[in-house]
Amino acid sequence: MRDPSADDVPCSITGDQMSIAQRLYALIFAAVAGLVGISCVGLYQLQSVYTAANYANANTIPSFRLIDGAYAEVSDLRAKFWQYLVLRDPAQRNEVAARMVVLQSKASEAFAAFERDFISDDKDRQLLQASLANLAAYDAMRLKAIALASADKNEEARDLALANQGLYTSVQQGFDAHLAYNATLGKKGADDAASLMSHATWQLILIATLVSLATAVAGLLLVRKLSQSFTQAIRIAQTVAAGDLTSEIDIRSKDEIGQLLTALKAMNDSLTDIVGQVRAGTETVATASGQIASGNHDLSSRTEEQAASLEETASSMEELTSTVRQNADNARQANSLAASASDIASRGSSVVAQVVETMNSINDSSKKIADIISVIDGIAFQTNILALNAAVEAARAGEQGRGFAVVASEVRSLAQRSAGAAKEIKALINDSAEKVDAGSRLAGEAGSTMDEVVSSARHVTDIMSEIMAASQEQTVGIEQINQAIIQMDSVTQQNSALVEEASAAAESLQDQAAMLAVVVGHFKFAGGAAMAVQSSHVAIRQAMSRPAAPARRIAKPVAVKKITSGKPGKVPAGDTNAGWEEF
């Protein structure tokens, strides 16, 4: 039965067009991207903290070392300056003066290195410039005092140095201010490092929290989506399994769940078509079984009528057999007469062929005679010309050639008569040749006519032979038909028994149709209504309430296509299906 909880199941899956694999890949990629982002931010902040914390080591301490070194050189330079003023020995003064040059050079190098590598900002540069200015003023005073001392003006030099003690104080204060400012810069770097460390820590915590929350939310949403999709797919499958084919599956995604729903929809539609076809087939079977039952009654009465008709047909076939036999005898006599006529026509054709051959020989002889006459005519013509030439020569000879002229005249006369006779004979020969040609043509036509007569006689002979053979075959066929009619009478009696078995088979078919209708009624089609049992099923129930007629022992039916003689065999009473299939 159908699960009530499966009613009104939403059969649609909504979502984007991403597949489940693509969503999982996207989630993994987002998590990896978040970790990479956290790592990048952490590295950047660590670099910033390191830069700030390392400021004292990279700038402040070297600055202290250079400034303090320069201050020490300047202090030594001041001490050497007073020593120079006190000394009176020129050699010692020169040694002290050389030492002051070295100290001043070292101080200048220290200031130059600081200005080149360790200036932090503009204020640091201003403090350095102020210290250099104070030191320059002090050096100017120092060099002036040294010049006075070198000129043996020791008192004036000492007075000048004492009077300008404030210059060195300014130098000392400038150095102290510069050192204090660099100390402040070092402390600021440490404070910045601590601040950056704190800021980086909170920033990393915030980013890690956001990435974790985003990944967790995306994962939970994906799991929820997959769970809902699989739950809906399971409910749809359970609905179909319960026999409810009314579900409308709306597919809105192309992921694996959408493909599963597509397959379920195809299965649902296929089952709907199959069940519909089975229901239609059940109704058709029910109707057909009723028609078979009624047709069996009609078949029984018609079988009796057929038996009576077969008896009348048997007597008619006996009369037809005697008539066909008489026709066969007549055809045999006509065939012998046609054969005699064909022989006579063949002999006439041979005689005509001989006549045609003789006429052709006469025609050839006539042509040869005509050729001989033509030769004689040519000889007479040449003789006439020769006689004419002889007469001309005799006339030229005068009296001596007169006798020869007479002979030539006679020869010419004979040649002319011979030519005339040859022309008459040639005309007669030509006339005879034309008549011989005409006779040859007539003889040829007569020969062709005789050939046609012979061919027609042979054709008539062949036709009569075919008629005779057909008559013999008809005789044999009619005898077989007579035997078949006798066997058909036996088969008709067997059909009567088979009709009763067909009735029992029709009732069994009705029972099967009723059971099939009950099975198909388990399914529901679109519209929500269960498949109603049609009016034809009422007849099925009525047929089921009637007991089936017992099958009796009947003779084995004879196949119509192969006619055999002898008594039909028996089949067991229980083998009713075999009899029905044979019928």
Image (cartoon, rainbow, N blue to C red):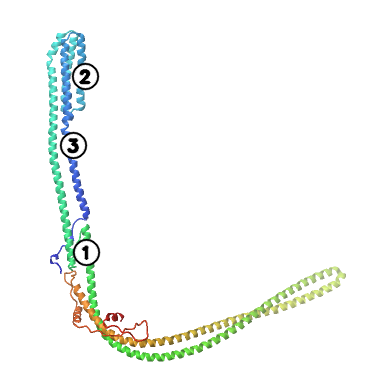
Which mark, by number, is residue 47? 3
Task: Give the residue at x 54% y 84%.
Answer: 457
Task: Give the residue at x 53% y 88%.
Answer: 336
Q: Quadrant of the C terminus?
A: bottom left
Counting from the top left corner in percent of width and height, residue 202 is at 12, 41
Q: Quadrant of the N terminus?
A: bottom left
The amino acid beneath tag 2 is: Ser
Counting from the top left corner in percent of width and height, residue 253 is at 21, 58
The amino acid beneath tag 1 is: Lys
Residue behind mark 2: 105
Choose between 343 and 573: the one closer to the eye: 573
Reply above or below: 238 against 454: above
Reply above or below: 387 against 147: below
- Mark 2 → mark 1, Cα distance in angstroms: 97 Å
User: In terms of secondary structure, where does tag 1 sit?
Assistant: helix
Neighbour tally class for label 2: few under 14, some 14-19, many 20 plus, Cα within 10 Å: some
